[in-house]
Image: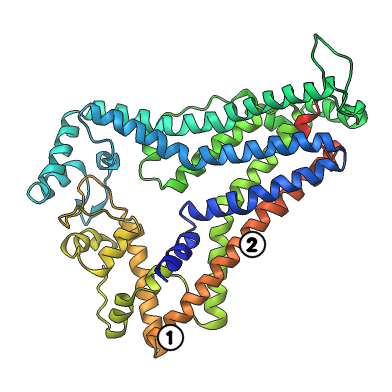
Amino acid sequence: MSLLINAISALGNNSGIYPLIARDCGIEVPTKVVQTYNQNKKDSAIMAKHATRERALDEYSTTAVWVGGVPAVEYGFNKFIAKQGLNGKISYKLFENNEKKGDKIQQSLDINIEKFKNTAPKEVAELEKIKANKGLFKKFTTAKYVAALVIPIAFMGVIIPKVNFLLTSYLMDKDAKKGLLPEKYLKNKTGGKLNIVSTDADTRTKYDNLYKSGKNTQFTSLNSIKQKNNPSFTGFSSFMTGLTHQQKMAATDGGYAIGRVATSRKRNEAVENGFKMAGMMYLNFIAPKKIEKGLDYMTQKLFGINPALDPKIMANKRFLALVRSNKLELPDKQENVLEFLDEKPKSLFSKIAAECGEVKYLESGVRDPGTFVDTEKVFKLSQKMNKFASDARLSGNVKSYAQKALRAKTANIAANIAISSTLLAVALPQAQFALRRTLFGSEVDPGLIQ
């Protein structure tokens, strides 16, 4: 049962990576590959073969880098930083934080050194070493975060598509020489290479003129992106510090989108890639959270059940027992969060916050002085737990209420995965194909028609 609850919890965490992986690898990519084949087959079976192979290689290799690229780069840099005698996992935010409780700063390098010098001497020694080598640590950390963006973006936005395009060009040339490609896509050999051209001359001429004149804002903006595809990464160390894995994936996705537009083989492919990437970013990172909020709101209004908590918390027997006895201990204010976590590390709330990744404790039970705690997020968790506890007690039967809420949350998570996956795997590709037909008058992937 716990494995099932953990799986439901992971899929329902729209701030984590598991819903993205489930949608992307399990539903979106296979569906898109099938649709790509069916769409291109309307024009040519041989072109469908090339389009399908290219799409499958692109989607799965990009997903591997998208999910694992940032942590792999950071892991490598942390190993390198460790060889310099510094702990690369220590939060960069401890250098910059000015979060206050009244007039006092709550978290910083100096404050944590003083606060934990007796309870976590080993970790404090690491902090002191970083303080003594602040300039070096900042340079390494900045390099780590910049590389964690640049390297995955370079692979997803440039290297993978370029290699894929070269493979397609090589294989299509072989098919052309065997006489397998439709004649309408070929013109005379130039320099020993076969060139593939669009058959819709009127459409091609129309959009060539629009593109050159700058009257079509879509093409103009995309051309601008192509000309300015050398983004500055100044200050990204501060931006990247404290971001979740999913937020870093979103950051790389933005660069990936620009790279895909910039490396498109033709203008038509750039337009289609821009449309597709914008839709994917919205449907991956924004829409699921909005859908979750809407489904939870409807459940509350229609059935009087509060499904806002993580399934693991609603299924926690100790939590339900404390709710029934009204003995659940929670921080009452955001400025009291750190004090609560430090003074009550064995409390259920502190343990749940640690399981959610909001705080890290050492084996001794002392809060890790090298990590930064987002007290706003921790306090929001406290508020959610308090609201659920209040609603459950008012229902008159805490256990029954929690079971209903768990079933409702499970149904909402399944519905969210289904809705967002359908939008990504079906609605977006169909909209993309419709755009292709409307603007370019073709069923074939524009990158194959050059």
**Mark 1 residue element:** helix
Alpha-carbon neighbours of circle 2 within 10 Å: few (<14), some, or many (≥20)? some
The x, y position of residue 221, in whole percent, is 68, 32
Query: What number of labels is visible?
Result: 2
Q: Which of the marked residues, 2 or 1, is nearer the chain's N terminus?
A: 1
For the N terminus, give its image quadrant: bottom left
Instruction: Identify the coloring.
Output: rainbow
- Residue at mark 2 to residue at mark 1: CA–CA distance: 28 Å
The residue shown at (78%, 22%) is: 174
Which numbered disc covers residue 400? Answer: 1
Callout 2 secondary element = helix
Residue 286 locus on image (x, y percent): 56, 53
Task: Place residue 59 in its image quadrant.
Answer: top right
For image coordinates 15% across by 55% down, the residue present is 364
**Whether residue 312 is visible:** yes
The furthest residue to the left = 118
Q: Is residue 216 left or right of residue 129?
A: right
Q: Position of residue 142 (x, y in %)?
A: 35, 30
Image vertical order of residue 68 relative to residue 195, above or below:
below
Q: What is the residue that sits farthest to the bottom in this orientation?
A: 396
Image: 438 above or below 129 = below
Q: Position of residue 257 (x, y in %)?
A: 60, 36
Relative placement, left or right, of 307 versus 192 is left
Name the residue tied to disc 2: 419
Quadrant (top left, top right, bottom left, bottom right) of the C terminus: top right
Question: In the drawing, does residue 277 fall left or right of residue 243?
Answer: right
- The residue sitting at 92% across, 30% down in the picture is 202
